[in-house]
Every structure is written in C-alpha cells, then in structure tokens.
Image (tube, grey):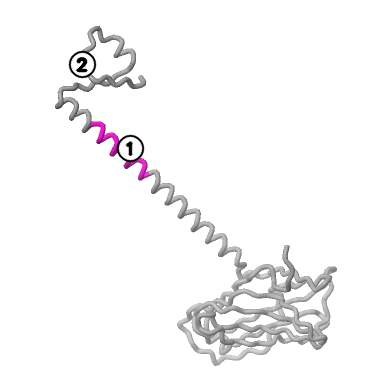
Amino acid sequence: MALGNTPRRETLISVEASKSYALGMRFVDEDGEPIDLTDCVLRFVATDPPQRGSTEVLNVLATIDLPETGQALFKFQASDLTLEPTSYAYDVTLIPPSGYSTPILKGYLEIGTNTDLDDTNVYEDLNVTTDITVTVGSGDSITIVIERVDGMFLVVSRLIEDFAIEMQKQVDKAAGSAQNALGSANRAYGYAEEMREWLDNAGFPFWKGTQAEFDAIEKKREFLYLIVEG
C-alpha cells in the first residue's frame, strides 16, 4: 500500500510532428455530474528526456469556454508540436481557485516523424470532444477513463510487449538448453562407440544385448557384456 498524489497509470500520447492535435477532457464527480471549472487552470507541460536536461519544451493551457459543463480542451497548434521526434515526459495538472494543484494525467508524449514540416496553420473553432473523462472523487481521488483511443495508448500495452519479449527470450533459452542437451547426448554416444572400438582392439570384445539374449548365450566368453532394456 502506498500514499501519494501521482497518477496510478501512465498514458502514452502519440502524435505527428508539426501537426495539430486536440485533446478534450471532461471533469465529473462520483455521480457523473459535471464539475464547475470556473477560474480553474488546466496545464499541459512536457519536458526533454533526462539525458537532454529535462528542459521544458511544451507548456499549453486548456481552453475552458463553458466551465459549468466541466469541459476543457487542449488545442495543440502545429507549431507547438514542431519538436524533434522522440519521447517527452508530460504532466497534466489542474489548479482550482484555491491553488491546490492536482495531478490529472502523466506519461509520455511520443512525437512521430513527419515529412510535411509545414506548421503555419492555426485553428480556432473546434467542437469540444471528450477524449478523457476525469472523475474526481472524495479526497481528490482521480479516476481516468479514455473515451477515444485514437492516438492514445495505455502504457500497459508496452508492458505486454515487454512481457512477450521476455517470454520469447525464455523460450529461446529453453530451446538452446534442449539443443545443448541433444549435443551432449550425441557426444556421449560418440564416446561410447569410441570406447567399444578401443575395447575390441585391446582384446576385450564388447557385447550388448537384452537380458533374454544374454541368458540365451550357452557359453559365455571373455567379453564385456552390457545388458540393455529390451
């Protein structure tokens, strides 16, 4: 069990470089009623990977035209997303009039390569869509439901991929062990044949057969007898 205010899951947002993107969020209470966002600030911040200094590369405030509906819209212009193709850490934070900030969403913003680098277009009018429903419960507990998966993927998909990769490694390892065991058996058989040849040459004939075959021999000779299962 752990306490804290960090989102329980990370969400991957995948977009094209230098192209517009809209992300709509709807805030409701535990009864599904809209939460009034009057005088609230909803902020999206993305930073460089740690190896590049964790520098802030994106800071966008959501548009809240009808706060009583609980609807907020992030309007990423094409120029906002003119970033080097890579993964950027991001956080979405809600700041109500009280100033008590609440982390809503976090994960990675994946910027994909795009051959069309024109980022001069700017859009304004856009119907508010609900990509994510945010349920704010007692104690400011946050529950996230992704309504539109287009361009958004739970990090759990990455975990599944990692698990599949690890399972394949184990299968390959097991196959390698089986191959090694087969090789050892073949080498042992070769050694046995070499030993048999040596015994024959040294004057100690080598005989191999079942118990019944051994019992049927009327006159045993100075052989090396090896009894095997029938």
Q: Which residue is drawn at 60% across and 91% down?
A: 122
Q: Where is residue 155 in the image (x, y as percent from the top left)?
A: 60, 67
Magenta span dominant secondary structure: helix
> Secondary structure beneath disc 1?
helix
Q: In which quarter of the image is residue 19?
A: bottom right
Measured as percent of width and height from the top left, residue 120 is found at 55, 92
Residue for point 63% across, 87% down: 59
Residue 181 lies in the magenta-colored region: yes
Quick check: 230 left or right of 161?
left
Q: Where is residue 144 in the image (x, y as percent from the top left)?
A: 72, 70
Going from N to C along the chain, the mark reached first, 1 or 2, is: 1
Residue indicated by mark 2: 222
Q: Is residue 126 above or below residue 205?
A: below
Instruction: Look at the image and give the residue range highlighted in magenta.
Output: 179-193
Provide the residue designation for mark 1: 185
In the rendered structure, are the residues bearing label 1 and label 2 in contact, judged by CB atoms less than 8 Å apart? no
Which amino acid does the dot numbered 2 rest on?
Glu
| Extreme residue in the bottom direction | 120
Instruction: Relative to 138, say whether 169 is above or below.
Output: above
Furthest residue in direction top, as rendered? 218
- For disc 2, the neighbor class at 10 Å (few under 14, some 14 to 19, many from 20) is few
Which amino acid is tagged 1? Ala
| CA separation in Å, label 1 and label 2 | 29 Å
The residue lying at 48 percent from left, 81 percent from top is 114
x and y percentages locating residue 75 in the rendered image: 65, 85
13 sits to left or right of 37: left
Identify which residue is drawn at 53% across, 89% down. 119
